[in-house]
């Protein structure tokens, strides 16, 4: 396992499976997918995020996520593909956002600056450049990503900021998978300036 040679930025990611909305706008819980567990963990490890939380109130879904993580960190998968275990070692399972915030607060001694995300620009309170500077200043930042059709209103009302959406110039299409969005956000916040 290759360990980073410099101190990791104070950035955490949480993938919420509840409370999120479905296409009709109802608050639901979505199912954990193997791809989301693996790919976001790999992006988090690549960009040296401090941790990646998978959040669901459903006990069986948390158990599934835990089995996936254990397979790659301790089981046969750890022997077969150790690089995957290095990424999945960042992954933690939580029941709700408050549990995530409490975990980061215990680890750092300060409550993280909580940032919700959305594909819509109507709630934006912070841009990528400003958030990047906040991360570089050493402030603990927790980014909340939604599954389904996005985060529920309660998540936005409990966040300190809402990050601007990813919107390439000239594109009228904005329906990235959460895995792609997470990777782009990590690159914009933790990648090189060039």
Image: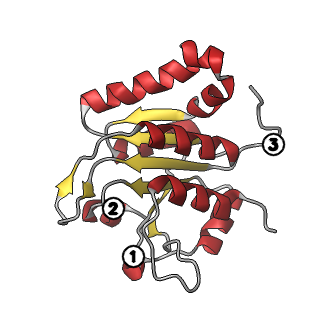
Q: Is residue 167 above or below residue 22?
A: below
Q: Is residue 48 left or right of residue 55?
A: right
Q: Earlier in the sequence, mark 3 or mark 2?
A: 3
Counting residues from the start of the chain, the first of labels 1 and 3 encountered is 3
Q: Residue at x 59, y 84 (%)?
A: 169
Q: Tell me the SS state at disc 1.
A: loop
- Secondary structure at numbered mark 2: loop
Say which of marks 1 and 3 sits in front. Answer: 1
Instruction: In the rendered view, tell whether residue 170 sits above or below residue 167.
Output: below
Residue under circle 2? 150
- Identified at 44% across, 69% down, the residue is 162
Residue found at the very far bottom of the displayed protein? 170
Task: Please give the label number shown on residue 120.
Answer: 1
Q: Which of 8/28 is in front?
A: 28
Question: Do callouts 1 and 2 mark residues in contact (Cβ within 8 Å)?
Answer: yes
From this view, report whether residue 90 is shown above or below residue 178.
above
- 53 or 43, which lies in front? 43
Measuring from the top left, give residue 5's x and y in whole percent. Answer: 83, 38
Which residue is rendered at x = 61% and y = 46% of the image? 43
* Badge number at residue 6: 3
Whole-percent x and y of residue 37?
47, 38
């Amino acid at each position: 396992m290759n360990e980073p040679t410099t101190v990791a930025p104070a950035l955490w990611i949480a993938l919420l499976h509840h409370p999120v909305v479905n296409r009709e706008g109802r608050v639901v819980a979505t199912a954990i997918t193997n791809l989301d567990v693996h790919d976001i963990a790999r992006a988090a490890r690549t960009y040296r995020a401090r941790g990646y939380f998978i959040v669901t109130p459903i006990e069986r879904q948390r158990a599934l996520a835990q089995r996936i993580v254990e397979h790659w960190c301790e089981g046969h998968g750890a022997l077969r593909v150790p690089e995957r275990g290095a990424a999945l070692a960042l992954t933690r399972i939580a029941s709700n956002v408050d549990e995530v915030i409490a975990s980061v607060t215990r680890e750092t001694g300060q409550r993280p600056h909580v940032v919700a995300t959305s594909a819509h620009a109507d709630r934006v309170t912070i841009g990528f450049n400003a958030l990047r500077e906040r991360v570089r200043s050493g402030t603990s930042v927790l980014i909340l990503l939604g599954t389904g059709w996005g985060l529920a209103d309660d998540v936005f009302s409990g966040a300190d900021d809402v990050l601007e959406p990813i919107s390439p110039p000239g594109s009228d299409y904005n329906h990235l998978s959460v895995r792609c969005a997470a990777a782009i956000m990590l690159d914009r916040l933790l990648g090189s300036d060039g």
